[in-house]
Amino acid sequence: MANLSVRAFEEAQRRKMYPQRNGPIGVACIQRDILLAIKELSIASEYLWQKEKNATDAHEIPHQTPNILLHNNFNLHLIKSALHIATVSGSLGVDIVSSIKHEIERMELAVVV
């Protein structure tokens, strides 16, 4: 799991999505993946909004209206977004999984004043 970012980047390079790691082409590839991650999150938020709207229109509690298709599409777009973010972090040489783990541990150890 710790090498997830590196593996995502290597897979992107293998698929010719990152012809260069540095320089203008590398920066353009990073920008492209950041924009793709934002796009996937935006699509996921639309599914979430639609689920809430459907629940409100039906006058039901949102958590009691199972809609497998909306849920699956929401998850799919979140996963795609995470893949783009992992690819970007791998191209930058940052292990995002370890970084997130350290941030969560730091937050858990933080004292609320």
Image (tube, rainbow, N blue to C red):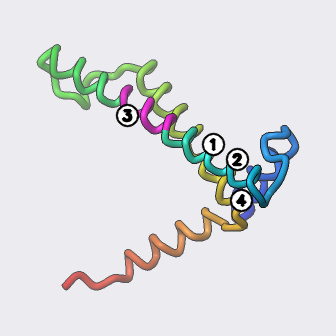
Instruction: Please check the rendered image and state whether residue 58 is part of the magenta-colored stretch, yes or no.
Output: no
Asked if labels 1 and 2 touch by Cβ distance under 8 angstroms, the answer is: yes
Q: Which mark is residue 32?
A: 1
Q: Is residue 21 above or below residue 57?
A: below
Residue linked to disc 3 = 45
Residue linked to disc 2 = 29
- Closer to us: mark 2 or mark 3? 2
**Outermost residue to the front:** 24
- Spatial separation of the CA atoms under disc 4 and disc 1: 14 Å
SS under mark 2: helix
**In this image, 3 relative to 89: left or right?**
right
**Outermost residue to the left:** 59
- Spatial separation of the CA atoms under disc 2 and disc 1: 5 Å
Q: Residue at x 43, y 79 (%)?
A: 106
Where, quadrant-wise, is the N terminus in this rendering? bottom right
**In this image, 107 relative to 58: left or right?**
right
Q: Earlier in the sequence, mark 2 or mark 3?
A: 2
Asked if labels 1 and 4 touch by Cβ distance under 8 angstroms, the answer is: no
**Amino acid identity at mark 1:** Arg
Span of residues in magenta: 39-47
Q: Earlier in the sequence, mark 1 or mark 3?
A: 1
Of residues 22 and 64, the one drawn nearer to the viewer in this rendering: 22
